[in-house]
């Protein structure tokens, strides 16, 4: 029952917060008005500025901000214990993350749909605009490279879900044309789209499990740069190029909408399974994992401040301000929809992060598996891992098996395990297989349940990487204007630079002991701190604007301090470790981020003081 109690209290807290704190912010602080004209109405160009139904825009915004962040972060953080991660997710989402996203969205709405960097140039200083754009460039490069790796890894691990992910592309284009060109209703196409996606999972499991190397006859190519991960990365970035330059209503927005419906179904199914598993005694949170862990990896950092940069998107994320001000503000049809899009999407993401924590603890405690090949058909099958007496591992024994962090050195000389050698694959597997246990408790066959959640993760990552590409295009175009480089102002050139740089980082670099295609993981250690520093800077910009509007800012003070001090502290701690381990690339980037951040804070402090002194409107 502990699993259900935690889930129920968390979900009720999110709902109450949306209808109380979120309502107060909308009415008293941001003063949303039904009479206000939004940028989508004012500058409707049919490409980037497109007035959109709030249900469709909610799907785009939620899937874009969620990605794999609220999955990977909590899945890593639970090795400190599930209680610290849970508290940060719940209270962080309500009082920090949702306020940040809501504020960034309204800020952009009141400044002609401009991005956070452009608004910072107006509110703080022209220098702040350039400095923030450089931070955004680095942030989005890491997002693109790492999320491309996540999707490629999912495709490599769960072949049966590949068809389901890619079938959403033609479906999305069809729905975009149906809704915007032919003015059709969305209910029936939406239901059909979800049915087709889940049908493709069944097809993939039975008949067409896609191994990309065999499909393209590349399995015998003798090149270290050609493997399943690099091939999928190239294909993904080709898709991202088109998602960035095509009208938002034709591919990006309807794809996110289609995927959001599929994701709602998957989340609802996991919750139903969780309820059944909880009532039947199969899932027990307190019996499966420690509330506060006593055994952690020897090389792991302390919980404080690293918890607050490890769990990012599930509680607060600077990337969300880019989505709010980059794409969503350009599609909002009515200003009063901003509370649902900005605040509502974030608390739903908090709910997703709670589900992840429960899946990675109580779900994993129901049993763990190892992947094998069927001796006759060759298909992937999952066998329970057993103890020395042949009994399937459950409870804390299963959790320890999934989260063992011992550092080991294999016969090939590769070091695995521990904090410093952590990869994304174990964390993704923990959520997918732990969540699949919940689904299996609801009667869904285990193999289908595992690929169903594999598709869910891949779709989340895909709907972030295509939005991130479009955002990176905006950033590069703005930089092109700032430094007067005309080719970079062209959307096709800017998109080419965005996908080309991220693909080169992902494909042609590799982590020590890893294969080519893992290059995104080189910069991954700095993503959390960089991302959370960006959230703190977003709070600063919103705060200066509110002072100019002569409105209260007391509710921003603590979140702003937290999101500036804790990430900077964690980055400094990381830099000391990188220096000791001679990680010069990370050390250089980390130093650059700290300098840019300090400079931006100084610029914002001057603007904040002047705005407070002058009370300008």
Image (cartoon, rainbow, N blue to C red):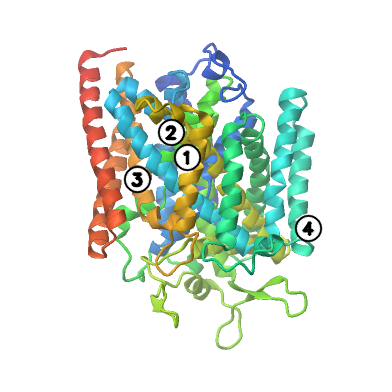
The residue carrying pointer 2 sits among few (fewer than 14), some (14 to 19) or many (20 or more) residues within 10 Å by Cα, namely: many
Going by the image, does 254 lie left or right of 614?
right
Q: Earlier in the sequence, mark 2 or mark 1?
A: 2
Residue at 43% from the left image edge and 66% from the top image edge? 290
Q: Are marks 4 and 3 in contact (CB under 8 Å)?
A: no
Q: Distance between the residues labelled 4 and 3?
A: 41 Å
Where residue 582 appears, x then y in whole percent? 26, 63
The mark nearer the N terminus, 4 or 3, is 4
Give the number of the disc on residue 497.
Answer: 1
Q: What element carries label 2?
A: helix
Image quarter (top left, top right, bottom left or bottom right) of the N terminus? bottom right
Residue 573 location (% of width, % of height): 25, 55
Which image quarter: residue 337? Answer: top right
- Mark number, residue 538: none
In this figure, which residue is indicated by the disc labeled 2? 476
| Quadrant in the rendering for residue 374 | bottom right
Q: Quadrant of the C terminus?
A: top left
Residue at point 69% right, 72% down? 381
- Label drawn at residue 203: 4
Alpha carbons under labels 1 and 3: distance apart? 21 Å
Query: Which numbered tag is attached to residue 530?
Result: 3
Please report contact status of discs 2 and 1: CB closer than 8 Å, yes or no. yes
**How far apart in space, not on screen, are marks 2 and 1 (Cα)?**
8 Å
Circle 1 — which element? helix
In front of the other: label 2 or label 1? 1
**As rendered, which of 256 and 439 lies closer to the eye?**
256
Tag in front: 4 or 2: 2
Q: Which of marks 1 and 3 is nearer the N terminus?
A: 1
For marks 4 and 1, give the one nearer the viewer: 1
């Amino acid at each position: 029952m502990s699993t259900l109690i935690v889930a129920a209290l968390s979900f009720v807290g999110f709902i109450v917060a949306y209808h109380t704190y979120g309502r107060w912010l909308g009415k008293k602080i941001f003063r949303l008005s039904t009479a206000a004209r939004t940028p989508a109405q004012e500058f409707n160009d049919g490409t980037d500025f497109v007035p959109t139904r709030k249900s469709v825009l909610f799907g785009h915004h939620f899937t874009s901000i969620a990605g794999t962040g609220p999955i990977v972060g909590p899945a890593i953080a639970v090795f400190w214990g599930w209680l610290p991660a849970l508290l940060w997710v719940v209270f962080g989402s309500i009082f920090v993350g949702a306020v940040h996203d809501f504020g960034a969205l309204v800020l952009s709405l009141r400044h002609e749909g401009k991005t956070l960097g452009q608004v910072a140039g107006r509110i703080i200083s022209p220098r702040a605009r350039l400095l923030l754009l450089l931070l955004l460039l680095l942030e989005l490069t890491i997002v693109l490279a790492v999320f491309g790796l996540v999707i490629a890894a999912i495709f490599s691990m769960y072949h049966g879900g590949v068809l389901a992910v890619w079938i959403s592309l033609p479906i999305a284009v069809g729905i975009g044309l149906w809704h915007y060109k032919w003015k059709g209703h969305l209910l029936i196409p939406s239901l059909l789209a979800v049915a087709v996606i889940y049908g493709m999972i069944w097809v993939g499991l039975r008949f067409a499990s896609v191994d990309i190397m065999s499909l393209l006859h590349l399995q015998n190519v003798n090149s270290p740069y050609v493997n399943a991960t690099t091939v999928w990365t190239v294909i993904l970035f080709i898709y991202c190029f088109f998602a960035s330059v095509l009208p938002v209503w034709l591919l990006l927005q309807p794809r996110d909408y289609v995927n959001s419906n599929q994701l709602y179904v998957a989340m609802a199914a996991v919750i139903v399974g969780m309820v059944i598993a909880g009532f039947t005694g199969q899932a027990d949170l307190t019996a499966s994992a420690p509330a506060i862990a006593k055994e952690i990896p020897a090389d792991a950092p302390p919980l404080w401040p690293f918890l607050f940069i490890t769990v990012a998107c599930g509680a607060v994320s600077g990337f969300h301000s880019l989505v709010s001000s980059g794409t969503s503000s350009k599609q909002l049809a009515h200003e009063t929809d901003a509370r649902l899009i900005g605040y509502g999407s974030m608390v739903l993401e908090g709910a997703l992060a709670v589900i992840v924590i429960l899946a990675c603890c109580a779900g994993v405690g129901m049993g763990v598996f190892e992947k094998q090949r069927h001796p006759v058909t060759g298909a992937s099958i999952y066998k329970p891992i057993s103890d020395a007496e042949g009994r399937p591992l459950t409870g804390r024994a299963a959790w320890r098996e999934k989260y063992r962090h011992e550092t080991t050195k294999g016969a090939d000389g590769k070091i695995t395990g521990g904090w410093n050698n952590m990869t994304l694959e174990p964390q993704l597997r923990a959520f997918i297989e732990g969540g699949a246990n919940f689904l299996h408790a609801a009667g869904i066959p285990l193999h289908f349940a595992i690929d169903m959640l594999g598709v869910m993760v891949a779709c989340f990552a895909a709907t972030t990487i295509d939005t991130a590409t479009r955002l990176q295009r905006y950033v590069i175009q703005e930089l092109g204007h700032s430094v007067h480089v005309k080719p970079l102002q062209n959307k096709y050139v800017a998109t080419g630079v965005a996908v080309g740089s991220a693909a080169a980082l992902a494909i042609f670099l590799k982590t020590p002991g890893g294969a080519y295609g893992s290059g995104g993981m080189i910069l991954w250690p700095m993503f959390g701190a960089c991302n959370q520093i960006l959230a703190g800077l977003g709070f600063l910009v919103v705060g200066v604007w509110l002072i100019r509007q002569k409105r209260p800012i007391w509710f921003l003070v603590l979140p702003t301090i937290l999101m500036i001090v804790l990430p900077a502290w964690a980055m400094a701690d990381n830099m000391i470790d990188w220096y000791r381990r001679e990680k010069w690339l990370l050390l250089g980037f980390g130093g650059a981020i700290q300098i840019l951040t300090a400079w931006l804070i100084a610029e914002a402090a001057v603007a904040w003081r002047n705005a407070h002194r002058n009370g300008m409107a």
